Image (cartoon, rainbow, N blue to C red):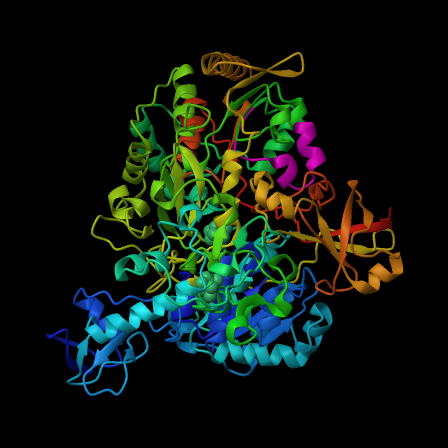
Amino acid sequence: MEMVKLTINGKEIEVPAGTTILKAAEQIGINIPRLCFLEELSSVGACRMCVVEVKGARALVASCAAAVAPGMEVQTHSPAVMEARTTILDLLVANHPLDCMTCDKMGACELAALCYEYGVKQSTFDGEKHSYPLETSNPFIIRDMNKCILCGRCVRACAEITGQDTIDFINRGFNTKIAPFFDEEYVESNCVYCGQCVSVCPTGALTESQMAGKGRRWEYTKVKTTCPFCGTGCNFDLCVKDDKLIGVTSNPDAPVNGRGLCIKGRFGWDFVNNENRLTTPLIKKDGKFVEASWDEALALIAKSLKEIKEKNGADSFAALSSARCTNEENYLVQKFTRAVMGTNNVDHCART
Amino acid sequence: MTNSINEITNDAQLMLLIGTNTTEAHPIIGYKMRQAKRNGAKLIVVDPRRIDLAEEADYWLRINSGTDIPFLNGLMHIIIKEGLHDKEFVRTRCDNFEALESTVKNYTPDYVSKLTGISEEDLYAVARLYAKTDRAMLFYTLGITEHICGTQNVMSCANLAMLTGHLGRPGTGVNPIRGQNNVQGACDMGALPNVYSGYQPVINTEIRQKFELAWGVSLPDKVGLMIPQMFDAANNGQVKAMYILGENPVLTDPNSNHIRKGLEKLEFLVVHELFLTETAEYADVILPAASFAETNGTFTSTERRVQRVRQAIEPVPGQANWQAIMAMSAELGYPMDYNDPEDVWMEMAFLSPSMAGITYERLEEKGIQWPCQSCDHPGTACLHAASFTRGKGLFQGIDHIPPHEVPNEEYPFLLNTGRILQHYNVTTPYSMAIQSMWSEEYSELNPEDACKLCVETGDQVKVSSRRGTITARVKVTDRVPPGMIWMSFHHATSPTNVITSEGLDPTTKTGEYKVAAVKLEKV
Ligand code: SF4
Ligand code: SF4
């Protein structure tokens, strides 16, 4: 592999040819800010937050798209760079509602984080503002296009991860907007509600409906787990607050799926909170179910199974285990059937 | 799967999909296939329905339902005739080539084309493309297995992959995509009537003795009953008590009236469930179950990857399922002694060579794909690299087996069933968000037939088979060919499995969900 030597902020570094300046900087622990760039997606160099100063270059260079060159001297946080970034943020904020105190993205908003870092409180420009209506017509994704900074991550995620091509840039200039064809709402489009767009959006423009008003992002505990729906084995984070499930968010380190999920994995979790969940054992008396304690229920099970086994033999019992339950639960069901009940009559719906 | 999911985007040059609607049933795998196709891999879709991936495919072969064996034999016929098979692989890694050759000789393109409805031209093109591509992955799901000849369909897929040497390397393989999240794991754990965990046969004396020693009891040496046999036995009074964990056979199993009758006849039924399901209604005792968010443990995905399930909230019913099963066992005089699910895993791994090297600690980051025999084994991304389980791969000459039931004058339509994107067997109907948009069955019907029946999208039709009648709304679409109605099985208001066929694969006892004869009437 051909290697390239350069210096970043005075530090010498050697990286494979073709590496971008942004990635090279990361290798020596320098974080260059970015809004449109995301590891898993193609780079477009649109937001210009990642600009750096390259000695001898006529203008600042977008580090997410520019490859390193031998002998390059890069400054990632020089005064010119800092000023350019502050101006970009200032312009973005000029047309961005500053209702951060009630925004569901607060705490995970990359725009807010950068404004904090660069000390941008409000805009020095006083321009026209959008007043798009909030789109809440589907039960999964809230779209607030007033908060969109046109980074295009959602467009690329839709095209490059899911391949659905539902959304794109429409209109020009000030009226540029991200939308499905003909500026329809998601419900009218071919959207499959994988929610990839939500998972990559750096601002509050796209948020999860189910999580709205349920808590601030820093209040959640995130628990990495495996999807309970199909056999693909996607991983994601369960968001928990006060022992209650609030939602699912992507975990970029998931080995199989990365950030990608489907409608079931990302939005189907709320069956856990369904009010019809059984919470206590039930015993049928005169054709009706009545609530019982665990002890009562277990005692009745033990008595009945013992009697039936004594009278009719072990093979009069059969157990159906579950392709939806964990390995450990399945192991215990087969052990129970074999070791306790004394029969090999155990199976599960392997065939559906 | 013999191979791994990420080989789709990293290695494969061609994907051959037979009977798998991947973007709906396994969306992330389907999305990866679409990525691979757009990055230059070839895509061949064999399906009677014009599924989403058919739109992207280089070849979409609209095969007549239930003709997979002649189709696969037809491809092999051409491949052998043109000498495109991997002679080295066949000679060194496989047995019984002559049997295959003599069977497929009869499957001439002309004959196969008539049976399958696929043009001779497409048969030639696809056979050549699959055989000549170096790294080709074959995928299938229930479109292959849910037939009376499911076992033979699977063997035919294996025949094709072996014949062309598409096995044992990254970007190749025979890859059944398992439907439910842990169907792989439930099999691996021995929730099957013939094997303990790690596929160790219950009839093998040495193995049985190992488990007897570990569990401190004597164990039965006779293979147990599979699900359909259990319900037959319940119907004829041999099985009198059942314990059902987290399954709803009334809704999901074929011929549900038979299941209901069996459940009614039981003397005692315990159902361990999240919700009061159609099956739970028959219980004498219902134990409330904990969901995946309320327990620690592991799931094993379709690529044999064991991954952690982590408890996020306290169990809603107060006890996780492993605790409830332990308590039940103790009441019956056999106390089990586990502090947590990790203890259960350790015991299982100790007793099961193919998973012996897997510990919770090693699963932390990325999980591990079994086989993994020891703690320094990295796991296995690709099976059969050097040899097959039995040593050499065995070719089988397999002839066409028509479906159990085919449309006739009285029942002129073919009923095909499957999953839709938004739903998954039996939990998603309890997702308020999903249910608010997709709460009803919309059966797919071709415009030609809709016109004859005078129905439009949204109209109700009565669908009857020899076993019963249900009603459902139709969606008029050319996704399905004329003469077919396609239904999902997610909705209690249109319980499709009341009318599905009673035909079973005699080996696996899998129901023939993909073909039944029905008639339609406008309501
Ligand atoms: S909606 Fe979000 S991800 Fe999409 S362009 Fe706007 S800010 Fe970027
Ligand atoms: S997120 Fe979707 S594709 Fe991934 S495992 Fe869950 S159901 Fe399957």
Residue A5, compared with residue B422, is above or below; it is: below
Residue A190, compared with residue B472, is above or below; it is: below
Q: Nearer the viewer, residue B276 or B84?
A: B276
Q: Is residue B368 left or right of residue B202?
A: left
Residue A189 location, x and y as percent?
63, 62
Residue A197, compared with residue B206, is above or below; it is: below
Residue at horizontal 65 percent and vertical 48 percent from the top: B438
Magenta segment: does it hold B244?
yes
Q: Is residue A50 left or right of residue B60?
A: left
Residue B274 location, x and y as percent?
53, 31
Q: Quadrant of residue B207?
A: top left
Q: Nearer the viewer, residue B283 or A88?
A: A88
Residue B102 location, x and y as percent?
58, 71
Specify the quadrant that holds the N terminus of chain B.
Answer: bottom left
- The magenta stretch is B242-262
Residue B396 visible? no
Q: Nearer the viewer, residue A171 or B482?
A: A171
Q: How many marks?
A: 0
Residue B7 location, x and y as percent?
40, 66
Residue at horizontal 37 percent and vertical 19 percent from the top: B334
Residue B341 visible? yes
Q: Nearer the viewer, residue B181 or B145?
A: B181
Residue at horizontal 80 percent and vertical 63 percent from the top: B447
Residue A132, compared with residue B424, is above or below; it is: below
Q: Is residue B431 left or right of residue A72?
A: right
